[in-house]
Image (cartoon, rainbow, N blue to C red):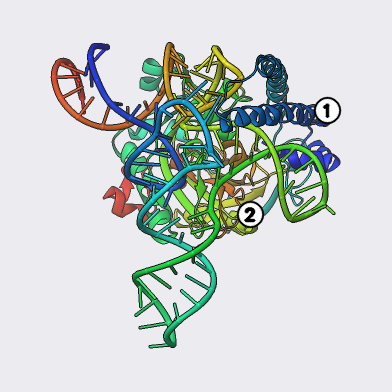
Amino acid sequence: MLSLEQIVRDPEIFRAALVRRGEDPPIDRILELDFRRKQLIQDADADRANRNKVSKAIGDEKRKPTPEEIAEMRETGDRIKTVEAELATVLEELNATLLPIPNTPLDDVPDGLDEESNVVVRTSDGLTETHGNAHWDVAPALGILDIEASASMSGSRFYVLKSKGARLQRALSAYMLDVLTEEHGYTEIDPPLLVKPETMLGSGNLPKFKDNLYHDDETDLWLIPTAEVALNALHQGQIIDPDVLPLKYVARTPSFRKEHTAAGRDVRGIKRVHQFEKVEMFRYVEPEESEASLEEMVEHATSICERLDFTYRVLKLCTGDIGFQSAKTYDIEVWSPGSAEWLEVSSISTCTDFQSRRNGTRYRPEVGASTRLPHTLNGSALGMSRTWIAVIENGLQEDGSVIIPEVLVPYTGWDCIEAP
RNA sequence: GGAGGGGUGGCAGAGCGGUUGAAUGCGCUUGUCUUGAAAACAAGUAUGCCCGUGAGGGCAUCGCAGGUUCGAAUCCUGUCCCCUCCGCCA
């Protein structure tokens, strides 16, 4: 959520920033509502101040209220209720107006309405050739992937990993968690996968994107589409003590997505699925550090790509392609020589203070200072199914076997998936 | 699922319906003292909002939402969460 206070102070700055994203925010309506809001607060506060004064005098003097006082205070009370009721509807509309507005992009985010305008900022060394043997052909033949089994038990866009395929995924997750916790100082978190509506609201997934989320009607809980949702809620409503930031978390969880909006895209193989495993980095930082943190997280993710021997590139997403809650996003794509395309294995964003404002996460810069909103950043390192695909397609040998990256061997116990 | 108990400030823990935003203790900050530290003493120490250039003033908040009342942390109703015991299940 954007800052109402800042919008009121500088409406045109916000309008201009949101227009860059192709949005036409109802700024004028917001200003009207805020004006009304302040009026109502003043009215109600004045009446309440008067009522407090009279009641306190009665108490101090240890006497019964006079009939006139009672009549007058009843009237005041009724008036307060009326004003409060109107205030409630104004606040409700204000909230409903503000919640669907996305974050404002940072200045250096390239303009553009779709992925055509994304900018490749870096491409690693390495080949981008193709051998034409896509994972959907290779992996089932190797006996490590069974899409027919997943289709029969769960439908399309699921997958069953078997044998060394399952072990490979487990090894990848474990390896990435170890790198991030041991080398980069992230604290490992294992959060719930089902969360309350308020938690989804806090991360920005609700109310706008409910169509992509799985929901249990009976308990009103939502399945997380990424660990970001849970990690973002870790300090909701809290004031973080001085000298605690930056907080760096990492979690390995499944991610559940309906993918309705992508119907028809990526139907072959396991590139786009309803459930996938992902190792997610998340940070709470002071605003001054957020841009440097974002770059550091990109470093962390790309260093893993390098150690997995991937050819990769880093994209800076344009204003029209960054996520709802994001102010700036880098995507990392790795080359898959089988399906001959770049696979998005990571998306790393700063959400500035957008999420902390939504969930009331604050911090105190130093003892006695007033509270501020931390910036939150999130990024995958890395997302499964696609990373798994890349290992298989990159490691495929002439003879049909698959050699896996050296760094994974301690986690798998073997270095080769034998040819069928 | 059944039976009880409880949710108050950073923590612990009081609080006859009326100077209670809230005793007291601990913690924390600052000052005095000290070569330094500790101890002792003194003062300060919640969050949000509204008005005001400022000084400052006002309002709200004792899990949450309603209600009773001139007045509610205190009474009533609902709800959420936590703890203990029993049952059931992993």
Expressed as whole percent of the image width and height from the top left, the position of residue A19 reads 82, 36
Numbered disc 1: secondary structure: helix
Q: Identify the residue position indicated by label 2 in the image.
A: A287
The Cα atoms of the two marked residues, 1 and 2, are separated by 30 Å
Which residue is pictured at 70% across the width and 29% down the height?
A: A50
Task: Return the chain for callout 2.
Answer: A
The residue at which mark 1 appears reads as: A32
Q: Is residue A420 visible?
A: no
Query: What amino acid type is highlighted by mark number 2?
Result: Pro
* Place of residue A410 in the rendered image (x, y in percent of width and height, measured from the top left): 29, 54
Task: Classify mark 2: helix, strand or loop.
Answer: helix
Q: Amino acid at mark 1?
A: Glu
Label 2 crowd (10 A; few <14 / some 14-19 / many >=20): some
Between tags 1 and 2, which lies in front?
Answer: 1
Q: Residue at x 76, y 31 (%)?
A: A42
Q: Residues within 10 Å of mark 1 (few under 14, many from 20)?
A: few
